[in-house]
Amino acid sequence: MTTSLPGPGAARTAAEFVALLRAMKTRSGLSYRALERRARRAGDQLPTSTLSGALNRLSLPSEDVVAALVRACGGSPQTVREWVEARHALALREQAAPATDPSATNPSATGTAPDAQAPAPERADATTGDGHQYGEGPGARQPVPCLLPPDPPLFVGREAELAEARRLLGREGPGPATLLVTGPAGVGKTAFAVRAGHLLAPRFPDGQLYVDLRGFGEDPAEPFTVLGAFLRALGVRGGTVPAELTDRIDLYRSLMAPRQMLVVLDNAADALQVRDLLPSGPHCATVVTSRTTLADLGGRRLPLDVLDSATGLALLREMLGPDRTAADHDSARSIVETCEGLPLAVWVAGARLAARPHWPLARVARALADEQRKLDELAVGHIAVRASLELTYRGMTPATRHALRMLALLPGPDFAAWALAASLDTGLADAEAVLDDLIEVHVVEIASAGATGFRYRLHDLVRLLGRERAEREVPREDRTAALTRLVGASLHLADFAAETLSVDFLGISQTDLAVWRLSPTDADQVLAEPLAWFNDERRFLIDVVDQALDGTDVAAAAGLATALTTLFQVGSHFDDWERLQGRALKAALRADDQRSATKLHRCLGELTTILDRYPEALEHFRQALLLAEGEGPAYRASATAGLAYVHRLLGQYDLAVRHFGQASELARSAGNVNCLVYATNGIGVIDLEQGRVEAAMARFTECLRVSREAGYRPGEAQALRCLGQSHRERGDYPAAADCFRQAASISEDLGDRLGATHATCWLGDVLERQGAHAEGRRLLARSLWAYREFGNLWGEAATLYALAEAQLAAGRPDPARRRAEAAVGLWRRIGSRTWLAVGLDTLAKAHALAGDPDAAALARHEAAAARTPQDGAGR
C-alpha cells in the first residue's frame, strides 16, 4: 500500500523541510542526472552537485532550487507555489525564533562578503595593538583580548555553513577544536570567519585572538612575530616576551591552557605557518582560513563554495537597495551570473555601482560580459579581483602555473585529466598529480564525478587570468602545439572508442593520421567504458572541433568531426552531428581539402538518410564518390553502400542492388567486414520487400554469423531485426518477437536508442498480431514518441502503420483509417514508394471494413501505381 507524503506545510524545521524534499525525490524514482535534464527542459538550472548539496544539508535550500526540484519531480504550478510559500514561511519563522544556543547572538545576520584582504601588505600585529579589555579572573586580574575585526555589515547567505561552524565550535569537547575554512580566492573566507567568531564570542568569555597571516602575499607573517603579538595581547609585558621561538610557544600554550578562547588564523599558506599558533587548552578553539586545502593539518573541514544565483542577487540587493535592483532585474542577474557567484567579484561590482548611483546596472552588466574587460572592471579602490587571484598565482609552483596557463586555453566549461595530459605532453598520472596540486590551492575544482572519473573546471575569472598569463608568458608556437596535441588526443580517443564498440562500418577511421596519443595503458583506462566516456566528453569534443575550426588546422578539425560520426549515430545526437560536420565541410571546401570533404560528405549522407532527407543524402553520397577518385576502396565502399541504401528506400531496387554489389566487392578488397555485412544486409532487405523471403533469410543469417564472428554488434542487431521481419512475413510471430527482443537488447547495450526503437516498434507489431494487445500498443506508443523525438519520419510512419493494422485486427475501421492516412502521408512526403504501397494497402482494408468500397478501390489503385518502377529507377 502506497502512503501519500505530507505537504510541505507540515515541516516545522529546516531539517524536516529538507527531509520532505528528499522523500519527494525518492518517490519520483528519478536520479540526480535525470532531474537535472528535466529541469533544463523546463528552463531551470539544477546541477546535480547543487541538488545533492541541497538535499544533504540541514538548512533551507534556496527558493530557486526548491521550485526547480518540485517542477522536475512533476509538481504542478500550484504544488510549486505551495512548496515555495512553505519554504518562505519557514525561513521567516526561523529568523523570528529566539536563539537557544548561547552563541547565537545574531542568527539572522548571515551571509557572505569578500575576503577582508587588501593587496597591500599589513603588519602582523596591526590588529593586536594595546586596546583590550580587562576582566576579573580567579585570583588575578587577566586581560580579555577582543581582536576580531568588526562584524561584516554586509553579509548574505552561508546559513548552513555558519550553523555547522557553530555546531562544531559551540560546545566543549575533550580537547581544543580546530575548524579549517578553505576555498578559492575571493570566496569570502575572511568575512565568514569573522562573522562566525562574533556569533561564537559568548562561548569564549576569555577573549578572541585574530591575525591575518598574509600567507599568499609577498611578506607572510612568521609564527615568531605572531606569537609575540599574541603574548602581549594576553598581558605579557613587552620586555618579558621570550626571545626564542620555542619559549614563545611554551608560554603561549601555558597561558591559553586554562582559558576559554577563540583563535582566528586568517589567510594561512600552509600547515607550517599554523601549527605553532594552535592552542592546546581543552576549552579553546581555532578557526583557520586558507586558499589551500591544508591537507596535512588535522581538524574539521568546512569548504566554502561560490554563491548560488539567489544569494548573489541578495548580496547585490543589500548593496544597491531593492528598488534599484528590481528596476533592472535582468542586468542584476547577469552581473551575478557573469561573476559566477564569486562573492568578491559580486561585491566589487556592487561597490562600483553603489558609489555611482547614476550608473544603470546594464552598463556594468555589458562591461562584465566582455571577456577582454572583465578583470579590469572588477576593481574598486585598492580591492581588485585580479590582485586577489594573482596572489594565489604567485604562490604556486612553476609547474602548476604552467598547467593553469594550459588549462585556460582549453575550450568549454569543464575537462578531464586526459585533456591536460595532451596539453602538457605528459602521461595521465602526471596530469592527475598536477590537477591534485591545483585543487590543493583551489584554482581547479571538481565539477562532477561520473562513470569515467572526475571532470574538473576553472572558475571563469581564473580562466581569464590564466589566458592573460598564457598570452604573456607562453610563446605562440607552444600554445599552438598544445592545442594541436589536444585535437590529436581527441581524435585518437574517438577512433579508439568507435573501434572498441565495433560500430564503424563507414571506412572513415582517422587512425592513419599523425596524432598525439596517450599510452595504450592510459587510453585503456580512459576508455574503460567507451559509451560513458563519449556521453561525458561529447560537449567538450564538440568545443574542441569548434576551437580548431576557428584556427588554421582545418584538416585536424575536420578529422575529429568525422571521427565522431559513429558516436553521434549510436547516441542519436543528430543536431550536434549536422551542425558540426556542416561547419567542418564548409571549412574543408574553403581550404580545398578534398580528402576531408570526401569523408564529411559521406558522413552527412548517412545523417540525411536517417533524417529522411533523401535528395540531400543522394547528393552527399554522389559528391563523396566524385571526390573519392584515387582514394582507397574503404572510402568508396562506404559511400557506395550509403548511396545504395537511399536508392532502396526510394524503391529504386535495380540501382540499389547494383551499388550494394559494388560496395560488397570494395569492402571485401579493403577487408572491411562491417561494410560488407551492411551491403549484404541491404540486398537481403530488397529480397524481403520484393517477396523473396527465403533468399532474404539466407542473407540475414549469413550477416548474423559474420557479425558475431567479427564482434560487430550493430550488424548483429540489424541482422536480427531483419530476420524478425522475415519471420513476421511468414507468420511465425513467436520467432519474430524473439529476434526483435534480442536486437533491442543489443542496441540498448550499445546506447543506440534509434536502433532499439526500430526493434521495439516491430516487437509491438508482432505482439499485437499474437493477441497481446495491451503490451503491443504500449510498445508502439512508446516507439511513436521516440521517433517523433528523433525527427525520424520513416519510423513514425512505420509505427502509425503498425497501429493501423492493430486497429484493423480489433475491428475498428475509423481509428485504423486515421492512422493509415497519417502513415501514407509521411511515406508520400519522404518518397518511400515501397512502403507507401504497403500503407495504401492497409488504408484500402480500413475503407473496406468501414463500408466504403469506392475509397478502398482508389487506395488499391494508388498502391499499384506506387509499386510500378519509376523511369530511371532501374527496371
Image (cartoon, helix red, strand yellow):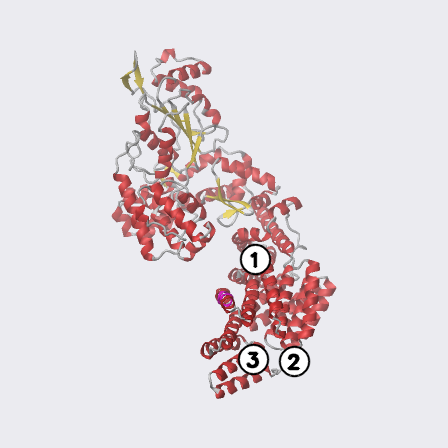
Name the spot of residue 28 as percent of width and height, x first. 42, 53
Marker disc for residue 110: none
Task: Kindly identify the amino acid type of the residue bearing the numbered disc 3.
Answer: Ala
From the viewer's perspective, tell me whether residue 484 is left or right of residue 65: right
Query: Would you place residue 451 above or below residue 124 in this image?
Result: below
Q: Dot 3: few (<14), some (14–19), or many (≥20) neighbours within 10 Å?
A: many
Residues 83 and 660: in front is 83
Q: Residue furthest bottom?
A: 854
Q: Nearer the viewer, mark 3 or mark 2?
A: 3
Q: Where does the C terminus fall, quadrant-wise?
A: bottom right
From the viewer's perspective, tell me whether residue 428 is left or right of residue 80: right
Q: Dot 2: few (<14), some (14–19), or many (≥20) neighbours within 10 Å?
A: some
Marker disc for residue 837: 3
From the viewer's perspective, tell me whether residue 768 is left or right of residue 213: right
Name the spot of residue 642 as percent of width and height, x first. 63, 68
Q: Helix, strand, or loop for circle 3?
A: helix
CA distance separating discs 1 and 2: 37 Å
Lower position in the chain sequence, tag 1 or tag 2: 1
Q: Residue at x 57, y 84 (%)?
A: 864
- The residue where tag 2 is placed is 874
CA distance separating discs 3 and 2: 18 Å
- The residue where tag 1 is placed is 751
Lower position in the chain sequence, tag 3 or tag 2: 3
Q: Tell me, yes or no, whether the two marked residues, 1 and 2, touch with CB atoms within 8 Å.
A: no
Residues 195 and 734: in front is 734
Extent of the magenta region: 778-782
